[in-house]
Image: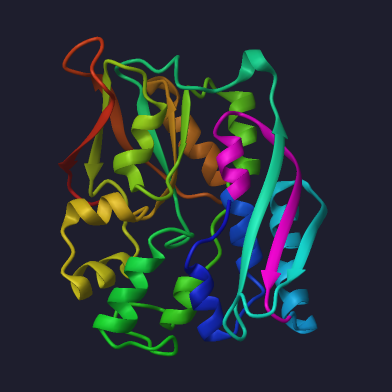
Amino acid sequence: DGVGTKLKVAFSTKKHDTIGIDLVAMCVNDIVVSGAEPLFFLDYLSTGNLKAEKGRDIVKGIAKGCRDAGCALIGGETAEMPGMYAKGEYDLAGFAVGVVDKKKIIDGTKIRSGNVIIGLASSGLHSNGFSLARKVLFERMKLKPTHKPKGLRRDIGTELLTPTRIYVKPILKLIKKFDVRGIAHITGGGLTENIPRVLPKGTKAIINKGSWPVPPIFNLIKEGGNIAPAEMMRTFNAGIGMAIIVKKKDAAKVISELKKEKVKSFEIGTVTKGKSKTSSPKVEFIQAEAK
């Protein structure tokens, strides 16, 4: 996996020591949704002319991401390709391997109507939606990375470069204690497209908009770009980086357990029956009072 055009923000701010965390996060978060424990990670860095300090910063972030995920950084490839990239630019890709017993794979087949959806708070945009975010913030609104718009605690550059949260350790602990029936990593496609991936046929998810606090950066993008709510939910994580589906009786205990791991979480919805037993899974949004 990669980190998409979030790299462009790193280039413009000349800050490269956290983008490696994003790279690891995008890979290991995809692995843990099946109940697998990440074992090792490899990276690929390509650039026109590698500067030693920049390379160190990138690898520093990758190493931290691996520590946060509890996996080993066992190697990688660095390629210098003059003429392939603009000055100062580079590309990153990551590869992770994890393991889970076949009988313990979480694939959503145990999900039933009445199960509860727990949303785990994101740290920000994570690593998706940056093409639209950059277009709105930097082109349409004419903001610069050093600007601090009203409502944000930090400047735009720092806000956008906030590393993607790595959920591996808290989720692996949950799996050992509870009957976790489905997990969705909320990446490109947002809640709208990622939750249906884990739902069985004949079910749908009812998501209560307003049941969790949406970070200010998302509203800034929405208002600045005059973006429809449906498009926002289909492009960004809207403050939820991971969704876990559990039995209703376990919901409060799961939220309490995540709090112990310093992960904010919210009961954001429920699973219900679809139109028929063979209907394709989908998400419906309803408006709830903000908590």
Q: Position of residue 41 (x, y in %)?
A: 74, 48
The magenta stretch spans residue 205: no
Left/right placement of residue 82 relative to residue 87 reads: right
What is the quadrant of residue 235 in the picture? bottom left
The structure residue drawn at horizontal position 51% and vertical position 24%, both measured from the top left corner, is: 180
Q: Nearer the viewer, residue 83 or 116?
A: 83
Q: Where is residue 115 in the image (x, y as percent from the top left)?
A: 35, 21
Left/right placement of residue 205 relative to residue 252 reads: left
What is the quadrant of residue 59 in the picture? bottom right
Left/right placement of residue 147 relative to residue 277 reads: right
Q: Nearer the viewer, residue 56 or 35?
A: 56
Left/right placement of residue 212 relative to residue 176 reads: left
The magenta stretch spans residue 44: yes
What is the quadrant of residue 61 in the picture? bottom right
The structure residue drawn at horizontal position 83% and vertical position 54%, both measured from the top left corner, is: 75
In this view, the residue farthest toward the top is 277
Q: Is residue 112 above or below residue 4?
A: above
Q: Is residue 154 visible?
A: no
Q: Position of residue 54 (x, y in %)?
A: 72, 80
Q: Is residue 21 above or below residue 268?
A: below
Q: Position of residue 202 (x, y in %)?
A: 27, 15
Q: Which of 163 and 249 is in front in this view?
A: 163
Q: Is residue 207 above or below residue 93?
A: above
- Please provide the residue range marked out in magenta: 27-49
The structure residue drawn at horizontal position 51% and vertical position 84%, both measured from the top left corner, is: 12
The structure residue drawn at horizontal position 45% and vertical position 21%, both measured from the top left corner, is: 108
How was this image coloured? rainbow
Count of numbered circles in the view = 0
Q: Can residue 278 be seen in this view?
A: yes
